[in-house]
Image: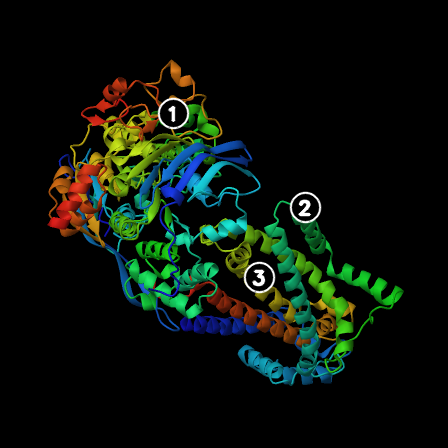
Amino acid sequence: MLRFAVRRVCGAIAVLFAISVLVFLIFNVVPATNPAARIAGKNATPQLIENVEKEWGFDKSLPEQYWTQMKLIFTGQATSYSLAHINIDQRIVEGIPVTASLCIGAAIIWLSFGILLGYISAIRAGGLVDRFVTVIALIGISMPVFWLASIFLYYLTYKVELFPASGYEPLSNPGKWASHLILPWVSLAVLFAGFYSRVLRSSMLDVMNEDYVRTARAKGLSNRRVMVRHVLRNSLIPIVTLFGLDFGVLIGGGAIVTESLFSLEGVGYFTAEALNQQDIPSIMAVTIFGAFFIVLFNTVVDIAYAYLDPRIRLGTSTA
Amino acid sequence: MSATAETAPAPTGAGGGPLLAVAGLRVGFVTEDGRVQAVDGVDFELEPGEVLAIVGESGSGKSVTAQTIIGLTRSPNSHIEGSVRLRGEELTTQTEAQLQKVRGSQIAMIFQDPMTSLNPVYSVGKQIVEAIRAHRSSVSRSSAHARAIELLGAVGIPDPERRVDDYPHEFSGGMRQRAMIAMGLALEPSVLIADEPTTALDVTIQAQILHLIQDLNRSRGLATILITHDLGVVAEVADRVLVMYGGKVVEQGSLDDIFYDPQHPYTWGLLGSLTRLDQPRPHRLPQISGAPPSLLSLSRGCAFRPRCPHEFAKCKEVPGLEARLAEDPGHRDRCRLAAEQKRKLREIEGRIGLEEPA
Amino acid sequence: MSEIGTTSSDGGPLLEVTDLVKHFPIKSGLLVDREVDQVRAVDGISFYVNKGETLGLVGESGSGKSTACRAVLQLLTPTSGSVKFEGREIAGMSRRHLRPLRREMQMIFQDPYASLNPRKRIGQIVGDQLKIQKVASGKELRTRVEGLLDRVGLSPEHYNRFPHEFSGGQRQRIGIARALALGPKLVFCDEPVSALDVSIQAQIVNLLDDLQDEMGLTYVFVAHDIGVVRHISDRIAVMNHGKIVETGDADQVCEHPRDDYTKKLLAAVPIADPRESRARRERTVAG
């Protein structure tokens, strides 16, 4: 198990390095125009461009450029020229609690509902309940987040002022914090819940036909016990893997649409701003930030998988 | 004795009747391709301490029969008729909750492939403990764990204190099957149903497992139903034999009956197509032509008719399972040929077989 | 290892294997994989097969018999050793040079459910090699394939059907037809009947026997059921843990085994005769 974990972590570090190089190349080396000019922004004076060149190392060799830029980004010294001279890293750090609140809350909702609905439709497969849940799930999957969010905003914050329309309240005031997040949570969770319920249903139906489930029944275990400790337990393995990947992408900045629509100033919101202004340093920073979380969660998922399924723990002896 | 042993129930039924009595068992399934009658009228009895072998090929209904005894085939698209009595008590009408009390504790069942029959994510010990505590909830985890170690040792697994926490994939095939048997014995059942327990194992391991099953049968009086397609295995351990074909029992009798005085052509065919190491090689392996029947389209009359070289007019009506030899009422079969004819027809080149090799 | 030697003159064995070794490395290490040990699947075996003969290769799971087949046929590259087909060394030969030899050496596989591509029609499964090896095409291809299907006991009208429409025994016949399509000289049968019902096993064994007589085939018959192996083989080699522990005439090996493992193997085979079985058990207890 240790060997496996060590290797995965080393692999992750290698991937992150490769991504940072790729990001560097894509944004600075590949395009034809002067990178310093692009960074300096639309209203740049020649003096500004020259300053940028020095600060960002464009007067030096490529490896030195890479090193200079990575240093700027990782040590919190990168400032944005197009976005009111904010410190990029600080902005990202300020956005993390917002994005985390959004993603973790949505995740709890979508996992609970997804697993519950998936479980119900699997144990009553083929029946009316199953078909009903299937329709609900498919509706959930088909509704685009931006559409659902807009509907919520219109009906539940404008027509009937049930929820606040925008903004984020810190956790220090839990009631307000939650009320600002409920609609974003639901908008985000609906899609995933639908999807996860289908995955779990399918996984459970497969596992129900396994020989060891037959053995569990033959031992005289109650139906509930067979379903939960044998069928569900084994069916959750693909769910865990899927969740790790989805959550990693989401935290890494994938909630752009939701954050923008509800004016939650998290990392996704910042990414949207940066894209609008074409602010290269910010885009580089959020890309690396996103990549970091995705790789992190990938690695965690791999290690968790080995924990959940003893068969794939490499390095243990088999008779 | 261990913490979980309660007073074992008396091995004989009330009034000394058979331990397990199956009568008129019929199991049908509704499938995409139509209605399949997997089991079509099966009767047999199991005495305490006896080993009954059920022999058949794919589609014979032997596995479905066994699984139906403990109600594993109950489902919305299955239709079950007939009676299964354990010590006089009817099982087919019991609720699922009532049957759960019987499964594992009075009738235990082990299956063919130990690799897939144990949950890979729990240790072997945990799965045995689960079986114990499901039926005896007052037993503590630690005493159940101790009992699991005891059981693993009793079935011949070396170093059981360490192995009890190993996962199924860390055992070899033979050891896995022993662990399954240990789990089956945990609650000291009076009947063990073993569905092809050695088919997936090497022949040397097979011999060990059969020996173990036989030991358990002798030392604990554990009545056993052994399901297999291998007549060699039957000859080694069985007391009585049921031969199944197309969902019906086509012949039943004592071990000697079946091997030395078989009455049904299918049995002759099975015996004939065996390779015998202790006899000279035949020029050609006697075979049964055709293939095991599809249960969707059984022929009318005797199900074996399409493959039987000795079929005649009367075979168009389904033959009943009857004792046709006056001196042996326990030996029953479904073939209408006269006893004298049977004796002549089954002699092929000095051995028992179905027909002259082409 | 790939010397292009002369083809054998009549008299030499069709297949000669000498000191064949196939090891699989076991790698371990925290960061970098180092080979710490090897799985000695095939650990130096030697045998020969004469033209028209059947050599039975018997062993239990893990004995290395399946790996040996694949190493001989160059489906796996041997770690070391020599494999001579018709006197020509083929061990370690390049794929390009091996291709024409593929016509001469074929294999029938164990699992009739897994060895046929479920998305292809059986006419294609049997006939594809004829196309690939440019032996036949179009109408002639079809006629040849139908002829093969008929020979193995299937109906030529089934040309366009899919594997799932057939039973296990029939699928095995398809596998045999496929192996024989190019008219090979040597056929490896890797557990061809183990996955089949008992009453069908005999049919397939008899079919293989017939085809051997008709087409002058040479077989290496691999199985764990020593009874079936003895029936079809002229000579038998017994494998255990990657080595051949005994070779000899089939009847000799089964009636007068010399090696301890062979004796153990034979003693474990159940005797389908209750009296004999009881007698043997009494002998074991007494002896």
Chain ID for label 1?
B
Question: As shown in the figure, which amino acid type bears the numbered disc 1?
Answer: Phe
* Kind of element beneath mark 2: helix
Q: Where is residue A50 drawn, in percent x and y?
A: 68, 83
- A315 lies left or right of B78: left
- Above or below — where is A263 with respect to B279? below
Q: The residue under label 3 is which amino acid type? A: Leu
Out of A48 and C171, give the one closest to the viewer.
C171
> Which secondary structure lies at badge 3?
helix
Q: Which of marks 3 and 1 is in front?
A: 1
Q: Residue at x 73, y 58 (%)?
A: A144
The residue at which mark 1 appears reads as B304
Is residue B148 among the parts visible in the rendering?
yes
Q: Residues within 10 Å of mark 3 (few under 14, many from 20)?
A: some
Query: According to the image, what is the colour scheme of the structure?
Result: rainbow
For disc 2, the chain is: A
Whether residues under marks 2 and 1 lie with C-beta atoms below 8 angstroms apart, the answer is no
Q: How far apart are marks 3 and 1 (CA)?
A: 52 Å
A196 lies left or right of C30: right
Q: Return the residue at label 3.
A: A242
Q: Is residue A315 visible?
A: no
